[in-house]
Amino acid sequence: MNEELIATAEMGDAAKKFAESELGQCLLGMAEQDVLLAQGDLIDIDPDDTKKIRDTQNRAKLALSFKQWLFELIDKGEAALEIFRQERD
C-alpha cells in the first residue's frame, strides 16, 4: 500500500512540476486556445453538418480533458501524500 501511495504522490509531484514548467504552461495555454477556437468554429458550422459539429466538439473535449487529466494527477498525488503522512505519524 505504501509503495502505491508513494508512486501516486511522485506522479502527482511530477505532474505539478510539469504544469508549472514553461512547457506545461505552453501546452495548457494551447489547450485553452483550442477550446476557444472550437467554440468559435461552432458558431459558423452549418447546423445540419452533424459530423463537423461532432468533430469540433470532440476537439474541444480533448483539450479540456488534457487539463483535467493533469490536475487530477496533481490532486491524487497530494491526497496520496497526505494519506502517507498520516499513516507514517
Image (cartoon, rainbow, N blue to C red):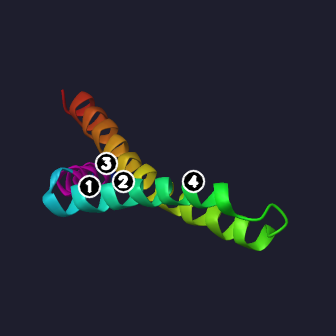
Q: Which residue is mark 3?
A: 5
Do the residues under discs 1 and 2 have CB atoms within 8 angstroms? yes
Q: Earlier in the sequence, mark 1 or mark 2?
A: 1
The residue positioned 31% from the left and 55% from the top of the image is 29
Q: Which residue is mark 1?
A: 15
Instruction: Give the residue type that dot 4 points to.
Output: Gln
Instruction: Give the residue type that dot 2 points to.
Output: Leu
Which label belongs to residue 39?
4
Q: Which residue is mark 2?
A: 70
Characterize the local packing of mark 2: few (<14), some (14-19) or many (20 or more) Cα atoms within 10 angstroms.
Answer: some
Q: Nearer the viewer, residue 30 or 14?
A: 30
* Magenta region: 6-19
- Write down the quadrant of residue 50 in the picture: bottom right
Q: Secondary structure at mark 2?
A: helix
Q: CA distance from mark 4 to mark 3?
A: 39 Å
Q: Earlier in the sequence, mark 4 or mark 2?
A: 4
Q: Earlier in the sequence, mark 4 or mark 3?
A: 3
Characterize the local packing of mark 4: few (<14), some (14-19) or many (20 or more) Cα atoms within 10 angstroms.
Answer: some
Do the residues under discs 1 and 3 have CB atoms within 8 angstroms? no
Q: CA distance from mark 1 to mark 3?
A: 15 Å
Quarter of the C terminus within the rendering: top left
Q: Earlier in the sequence, mark 3 or mark 2?
A: 3
